[in-house]
Amino acid sequence: MARPAVYPGSFDPLTLGHLDIIRRASRIFDNVIVAVSNNPAKTHTFSVQERIVMVEDAVRDLRNVVVDTFTGLLVDYLRSKGARVLIRGMRVISDMDYEFQIASFNRHLYKEVETVFLMPDDRYTYVAASMVKEVAKLGAKVDAFVTPCVSRKLRQKFQPVKSRR
């Protein structure tokens, strides 16, 4: 019986860098769960349901990938899914310190967990969801960084409805 690997994140919004990591993980692991975090303490641009829809749209061609959501401790979610592999994306060297701290802390809380770091394609090394949102708010096209579905949702979110005169 194959155990799933879990790729957690806020995915607010999903970027092509995230999607690249999901695709890479789907080639390595039998089953991948993309776990969209539902943290009420954080302010997100998109609701958890909107984020799930965007991720589901992007992974619909990947037969061994499912999308889910979780609230609370990630290690509790991993246990509930029988997962021992945690996937994390590593874009740039500045990610390393934070990711290592989190991996160490997760291992302390759940001894059986192994964190696997995957690097996205070079094209996505500097793509961050926060930057995508910022330039989308300012009216720039973000098609090179996100899926068509996400691009459409960002335009809907940030472009004001034109008033009728």
Image (tube, rainbow, N blue to C red):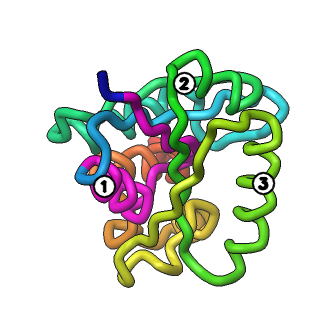
Q: Identify which residue is drawn at 35% across, 49% down.
A: 152
Residue identified by numbered label 1: 147
Residue identified by numbered label 2: 69
Q: Are marks 2 and 3 in contact (CB under 8 Å)?
A: no
Work out whether residue 144 or residue 52 is closer to the camera in this orientation and state it: 52
Of all residues, the one furthest to the top in this rendering is 80
Horizontally, is 147 left or right of 91 in the view? left
Regarding mark 3 in the picture, which secondary structure is present there?
Answer: helix
The label nearer to you, 2 versus 3, is 3
Regarding mark 1 in the picture, which secondary structure is present there?
Answer: loop
Disc on the earlier residue, 1 or 3: 3
Disc on the earlier residue, 1 or 2: 2
Horizontally, is 37 left or right of 157 in the view? right
Q: Identify which residue is drawn at 30% across, 58% down.
A: 24
Q: Range of the magenta residues? A: 3-26
Disc on the earlier residue, 2 or 3: 2
Q: Identify which residue is drawn at 77% across, 72% down.
A: 97
Q: Are marks 1 and 2 in contact (CB under 8 Å)?
A: no
Q: Can residue 164 be seen in this snapshot?
A: yes
How many numbered circles does the render carry? 3
Work out whether residue 8 or residue 76 is closer to the camera in this orientation and state it: 76
Quarter of the rendering occupied by the N terminus: top left
Q: Amino acid at mark 3?
A: Ser
The label nearer to you, 1 versus 2, is 2
Q: Can residue 151 be seen in this snapshot?
A: no
